[in-house]
Amino acid sequence: MKSLNYMEVSFKAQSVNEGFARLVVAGFCLPLKPNLDELGDIKTAVSEAVTNCVVHAYPNGNGLVWLSCEYFDDGLVKIVVKDEGVGIKDIAKAREPFFTTKPGEERSGMGFTVMSSFMDKLRVASSPGKGTKVVMIKQLS
């Protein structure tokens, strides 16, 4: 498997940048000629990952999100979304459907579940006080 292309961007952890992240990754993947379903899956997963950074990583509203994407000669796409926010104390609990750290708000607690369902692989690494890294893998047809 040979890397064909790689990109990385960073942006403020603001909800307005969720759409930007979706478009950047979708545009970057276009040379692989993904079908509409694959493109939709990628955009949805990226939205969820970026939204998690905006909503959970930086409670004071100040911080950056790093987004990288790489694709390979076999059609594999690797997307990484990371932050340097508060981190996740219990990743297994956070990955449970309907779990949310903001129960008083309109949050479904389905972010990681959605990412898992739209991507082929999902890895989450986090350290409290240091941030979170989400790695998503999608094999395009």
Image: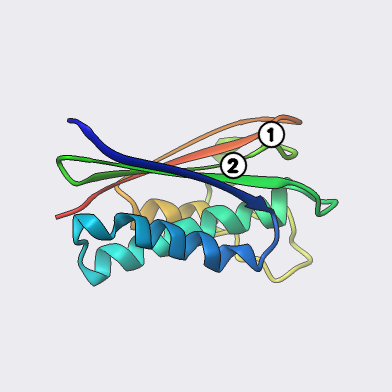
Labels 1, 2: front one:
1
Name the amino acid, label 1: Lys
Q: Is residue 5 above or below residue 99?
A: above
The local secondary structure at tag 2 comes to: helix
Residue at the image point whose x is 29% and y is 47% from the top: 120
Q: CA distance from mark 1 to mark 2?
A: 9 Å
Residue 74 marker: none
Question: Of residues 71 and 139, which is closer to you in this image?
Answer: 71
Q: How many marks?
A: 2
Q: Secondary structure at mark 1?
A: loop
**Residue 81: horizontal and vertical position, in percent?**
52, 44
Can residue 114 be seen at all in this image of the molecule?
no
Lateral position of residue 74 relative to residue 54, left or right: left
Give the left or right position of residue 15, taking residue 125 as reference.
Answer: right
Tell which of 128 and 131 is nearer to you.
Answer: 131
The residue beneath circle 2 is 93
Residue sitting at x 75%, y 38%: 86
Q: Quadrant of the N terminus?
A: top left
Location of mark 1 (residue): 89
Is the residue under label 2 in contact with that under label 1 (CB below 8 Å)? yes
**For the point 70% across and 71% down, which residue is it?**
106
Q: Position of residue 64 (x, y in %)?
A: 69, 46
Q: Quadrant of the C terminus?
A: bottom left
Expressed as whole percent of the image width and height from the top left, the position of residue 69 reads: 40, 44
Identity of the amino acid at label 2? Lys
Q: Residue 89, can we see it?
A: yes
Residue drawn 74% across the image and 61% down it: 103
When the figure is inspected, residue 1 is found, relative to residue 119, above or below; the finding is above
Residue farthest to the right? 60
Alpha-carbon neighbours of circle 1 within 10 Å: few (<14), some, or many (≥20)? few
